[in-house]
Image: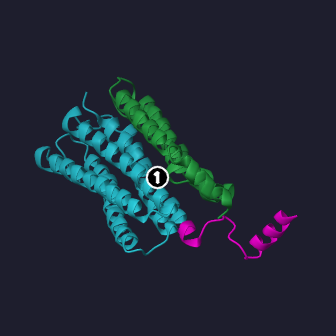
């Protein structure tokens, strides 16, 4: 542990409540979006985008990754992001194609 | 010059390259691999959700969406209490840490109770089964029960894990790092719900 870590932990105390309020606020926006009449794909993009913001906030502040060494983030996350990206890249266009191929 | 010395020690195995303990690194690696499991399940569900023209929308504002929103509130708040517990433990205040971790366990238990009620409502009142339901899209039950069931299992394991941690902390055992590692797991469970809630519930609200 570097000495700066203890210092940042002490300073981060009140910031946690702010993160919590932000997370609750984003959840409220998500529930509001769910009741708008938009195409499933647009709603999916909006909800996923907001969820990614929430995930980043939780990982950075609650899981403390923002205050860890940068090498830890670079070791853990590129593979995960690439895998999720590939899953979406391969499967999502196909799911839309299936939709168009159905007899009406 | 001292930077050079540190770098040499690190790469010769003399120090930890990430400046965290091996237990904490282990939990991080577990969290990443478990994320991949949930990513695969959620992407498979999303594929089916987009490809199916008549995917059922069985979640009315009351009770389903209200319950799920309260469950989200429980998990987010329990993450806050967990972070405060870790904070208290880091500053050497074991009594406060025990209180915060107990509050976290209450939040997790409330989540499980509400979720079980929601499952019961779907199974008993709406007649949803694993491979059949009244709305005709058989995979709805399979994806819903698989994803939320796996997540609920994680929450139950998390509450038990915190129970083990809290009794040890109360007896003066375990270090701040151990509490922080259990916190990593708990925040991960919260994080997964941040994707399950919008994708499974909010994508299928009954207008």
Residue A23, compared with residue B113, is above or below; it is above
Q: In the figure, B73 relative to B23: above or below?
A: above
In the image, is B68 to the left or to the right of B36?
left
* Quadrant of the rendering where the N terminus of chain A is positioned: bottom right
Letter of the chain in green: A
Q: Between residues B54 and B12, which one lies in front from this camera angle?
A: B12
Residue A34, given in percent of the width and then of the height, sits at 35, 30
Q: Quadrant of the C terminus of chain A?
A: top left
Within the magenta stretch, is there residue B13? yes
Mark 1 element type: helix
Side (left or right) of B141 relative to B21: left
Residue A2 appears in the rendering: yes
- How far from the left and from the top, in percent, is residue B203? 35, 36
Residue at the spot 49% in from the left edge and 61% down from the top edge: B31
Q: Percent from the top left, x then y, of residue B55?
A: 29, 38
Report crowding for label 1: few under 14, some 14 to 19, many 20 or more residues within 10 A (C-alpha): some
The residue beneath circle 1 is B39
Report the span colored magenta: B1-26
Q: Which chain is cyan in the picture?
A: B
Instruction: Please name whichever residue, B21 or B176, is drawn nearer the observer in this view of the structure.
Output: B176
Q: Quadrant of residue B25?
A: bottom right
Residue pictured at 47% horizontal, 36% vertical: A50
Pinpoint residue A12: horizontal percent, then vertical percent.
55, 48
């Amino acid at each position: 542990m570097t000495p700066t870590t203890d210092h940042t932990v002490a300073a981060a105390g009140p910031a946690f409540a702010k993160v919590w309020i932000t997370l609750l606020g984003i959840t409220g926006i998500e529930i509001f979006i769910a009741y708008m009449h938009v195409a499933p794909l647009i709603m999916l993009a909006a909800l996923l985008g907001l969820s990614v913001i929430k995930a980043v906030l939780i990982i950075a502040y609650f899981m403390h990754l923002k205050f860890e060494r940068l090498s830890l983030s670079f070791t853990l996350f590129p593979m995960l992001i690439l895998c999720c990206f590939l899953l979406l890249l391969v499967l999502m266009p196909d799911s839309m194609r299936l939709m168009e191929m159905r007899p009406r | 010059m001292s930077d050079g010395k540190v770098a040499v020690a690190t790469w010769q195995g003399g120090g930890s390259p990430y400046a965290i303990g091996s237990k904490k690194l282990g939990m991080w690696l577990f969290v990443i691999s478990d994320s991949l499991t949930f990513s695969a399940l959620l992407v498979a569900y999303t594929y089916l959700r987009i490809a199916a023209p008549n995917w059922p929308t069985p979640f009315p504002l009351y009770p389903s969406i209200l319950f799920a929103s309260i469950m989200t509130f429980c998990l987010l708040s329990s993450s806050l209490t967990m972070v405060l517990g870790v904070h208290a433990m880091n500053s050497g205040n074991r009594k406060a840490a025990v209180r915060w971790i107990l509050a976290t366990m209450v939040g997790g238990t409330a989540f499980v109770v509400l979720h079980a009620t929601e499952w019961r409502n779907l199974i008993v009142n709406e007649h949803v089964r694993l491979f059949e339901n009244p709305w005709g899209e058989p995979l709805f039950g399979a994806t819903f029960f698989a994803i939320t069931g796996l997540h609920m299992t994680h929450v139950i394991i998390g509450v038990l894990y915190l129970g083990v941690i809290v009794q040890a902390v109360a007896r003066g055992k375990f270090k701040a790092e151990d509490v922080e590692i259990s916190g990593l797991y708990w925040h991960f469970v919260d994080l997964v719900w941040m994707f399950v809630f919008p994708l499974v519930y909010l994508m299928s609200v009954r207008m």
